Amino acid sequence: MAKQTKNTSKILTELLKLQIGNISERIEREGQTVFGGSNLLESDEIADLSVQFLQLLVALLESKDPDDDASPQFHALEMFFNNLAKQILVRGGRIEDLVRYIQFVQHTLIDTLGEDQNTKVDDARAILLYLSSLFNELVLAVFQAYLSEKERTIWAQEAELRETSTPITEIWDGVLTLPIIGTLDSSRTMIVMEALLNRIASERAVAVVMDLTGVKNIDSQVSHHLIQMVRAIQLMGADAILTGIRPDIARALTSLNIDLGNVTTRATLSDGLKEAFRRMGIQISHKAA
Amino acid sequence: MSGMAISGLHLTQIGRENFLLEPSHSLDISGSDELLVEILQRLQEAKASTLYYDLAELPLIEPRYYRWLNMLARACRAVNVAMVCIRMQPTAAFALSSYMQGSPDFAVGQGVKQ
């Protein structure tokens, strides 16, 4: 932050203490306009906001070194805006509004300084530089909070996508089913295989029925991934059964020279399950009338 | 059950004709010919019919190790012993499936068949 003399921080502190009512009122009024209108914050919260901010700013100015951005007082102020940003984002607010609010607070402090007739030009210049540097740091803290919230959202969405793209179900003791819908690209294959192989290990599955009914088209890369998945399943000591291969997919596999000689295939998911049960020695029969 | 220690691995007789091979991290497959002879000798002495190769402690099977497994499986077949690799880890299966061509020379299973 911009270096200031002990004198400038003293002048600013005194000015703040002297004008605290006026500054607090103006900040609060702006807060009501920005956050109150959209019901992001309650009136009490907005009032507390301006009081807390001024208290933290005075604490920083009265600290041993107000320029030290590693001091606990500076960290407290930074965290105050960081938490406020998270609160606003969680409640559906826009980060732009918060940044405008912070700029308004800065302008209010500068206006107060301008209205004071006793401050010398050199001191006013030093205070202005200090405030500019301080508020830049605070805006950065707000953007950091914004980015971390966005990252958290993206991570949660990715996790949800991973979960829904690998609907592995243990349909019977030791029998897993995996319907594959859409395209199997490299990254999806990795996700599906990781989930599937871990499930085989944890459930000690002996058969995996992969249903391709939802695969609309297949190319060389997808078929390669499919064969890789079958191999990996077999290496884990489980049987892989492919079902639901549509005629056009079968034709595409043939023209791609994909050999399914070592792979068990069945027409439908139901047939695949019957085959898995047969291998496990499980007999399913209708209940006698 | 009786165990026999060969440098870098442990060979245990389970049942009458089955053997369990547990490799340790110190297994050196660079001298694979001598190692192979030693293993086959033990299997033949005990009239083994199946060798279970436990892969539980191997998070990754690299091409060199895969070649060793195939070589051992083919050699076992030559002395009428079936080799079954058991308890392959998901990470190892994933890596192996990405580079292997065709079928391996060994069978795979999840554990020792009682």
Image (cartoon, rainbow, N blue to C red):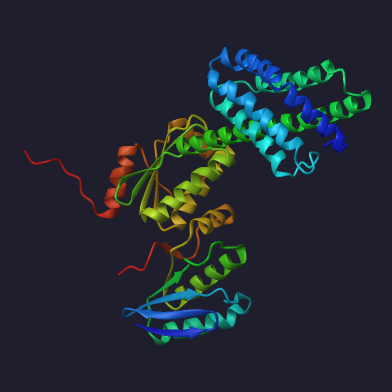
Left or right: where A87 falls relative to A66: left
Left or right: where A181 falls relative to A209: right
Work out whether residue A129 can be spotted: yes
Out of A175 and A289, give the one closest to the viewer.
A175
Q: Position of residue A109 (x, y in %)?
A: 77, 22
Out of A45 and A237, give the one closest to the viewer.
A45
Work out whether residue A259 can be spotted: no
Farthest residue, direction right: A122
At 49% from the left and 71% from the top, the residue drawn is B73
Residue A145 drawn above or below residue A121: below
Count numbered badges in the picture: 0
Residue A259 drawn above or below residue A135: below
Q: Quadrant of the N terminus of chain A?
A: top right
At 67% from the left and 31% from the top, the residue drawn is A55
Q: Position of residue A166 (x, y in %)?
A: 45, 39
Q: Quadrant of the C terminus of chain A?
A: top left
Residue B62 drawn above or below residue A215: below
Out of A234 and A74, give the one closest to the viewer.
A74
Farthest residue, direction bottom: B45
At 47% from the left and 47% from the top, the residue drawn is A195
At 56% from the left and 65% from the top, the residue drawn is B66
Residue A69 drawn above or below residue B75: above
Q: Quadrant of residue B51?
A: bottom left
Out of A214 and A128, give the one closest to the viewer.
A128
Q: Position of residue B33 (x, y in %)?
A: 59, 80
Q: Position of residue A190 (x, y in %)?
A: 55, 45
